[in-house]
Amino acid sequence: MNPQAKLIFITSLLLGTTITLSSNHWIMAWTGLEINTLAILPLISKSHHPRAIEAATKYFLVQATASTLVLFASMTNAWATGQWDITQLTHPASCMILTSALAMKLGLVPFHFWFPEVLQGSPLITGLLLSTAMKFPPITLLFMTSPSLNPILLTTMAILSAALGGWMGLNQTQTRKIMAFSSISHLGWMAMILVYDPKLTLLNFYLYTLITAAVFLTLNTIKALNLSTLMTTWTKTPSLSATLLLTLLSLAGLPPLTGFLPKWMIIQELTKQDMTPTATIMALLSLLSLFFYLRLAYCATITLPPHTTNHMKLWHTHKPTNASVALLVTMSTLLLPISPMIRTIV
């Protein structure tokens, strides 16, 4: 892709996100979401492969539908209450429509079907943007409207997302699809706590973004698009494969790694809200996700592939690892001891 064109698209992404984050009026928030959608489409379809074109088309149709619903929800609320302010969403029907629309934008169950397919058709770096940056504006809109949202609807969607995200990722062999189902599962945790402690949702999203960025950039460095490729990477970058093991376990939420912090805080908050059965269900459903993270980690570092044909293995690559990958991997694994400080900041 032309560097000038790529610069324009990345700038448009930043602009759209900034407009949505800083807006008080629904029309401005909707405008920012539309700019984001239009800016990411060329980045998805830049390879001109039929699968990439299909992914871009699916993404456009789903995001256009969700944006229409956002506009419809805000207009219904303005018609009933005379308010266009984002924080003044009080009409019950508008709240339900808006929750559905933003769930569609994020890929929450039952609006999750598009996300694994779109991620599978995108390059790894675009997949990283779709999993993190593109979810930030809808998450902030949910954060701003959280006092008005229906807790029963969000809790149901959260449990279904955690269950299906873990369950459907079990038999996947493509790393991008595994990361897509991982994202759906994590969104379930964020939606679960949104009504009770919105700041905790943002903390969860920040840490999820950090760890997912480390995983995607590592996979991009070793060019691993499926598990069979991942099995042979230990010969190319042994240290990166070893740190990928820790990063994946952090994404699974195992102590004493960074990813344990949001799950710990959310279970603690749910217990305070007398929702112990819900907290137990969420904790048990996270075991499903843990299984496929362990499978990824096993393929990356522990197992050797069975080969019937002789072929030459690549030995250590001379290309140095990006400093940003090293920094992200370090933060993805070692932030738990400073969790009290993180909690006071967020």
Image (tube, rainbow, N blue to C red):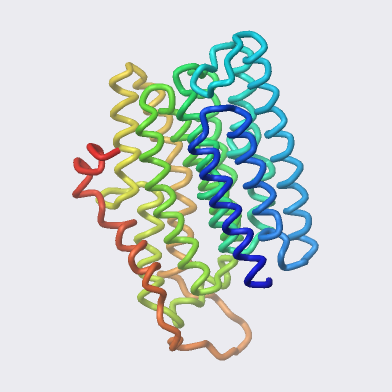
Name above or below for residue 201 compared with residue 325: above
Name above or below for residue 150 compared with residue 214: above
Q: Position of residue 168 (x, y in %)?
A: 59, 44
Residue at the spot x=46%, y=27% of the render? 144
Residue at the spot x=78%, y=58% of the render? 53
Number of numbered discs:
0
Q: Is residue 178 left or right of residue 297?
A: right
Name above or below for residue 270 compared with residue 310: above
Residue at the spot x=41%, y=24% of the render? 278
Q: Is residue 245 left or right of residue 83?
A: left
Residue that extends furthest to the right in the rendered view of this protein: 50
Is residue 140 among what the camera can see?
A: yes
Name above or below for residue 5 compared with residue 56: below
Q: Position of residue 166 (x, y in %)?
A: 52, 43
Q: Position of residue 44 (x, y in %)?
A: 68, 58
Is residue 162 among what the camera can see?
A: no
Q: Which part of the image, by quadrant, shows the C terminus?
A: top left
Q: Position of residue 189 (x, y in %)?
A: 44, 35
Q: Which part of the image, by quadrant, shows the N terminus?
A: bottom right
Occupied quadrant, residue 273? top left
Residue at the spot x=51%, y=17% of the render? 88
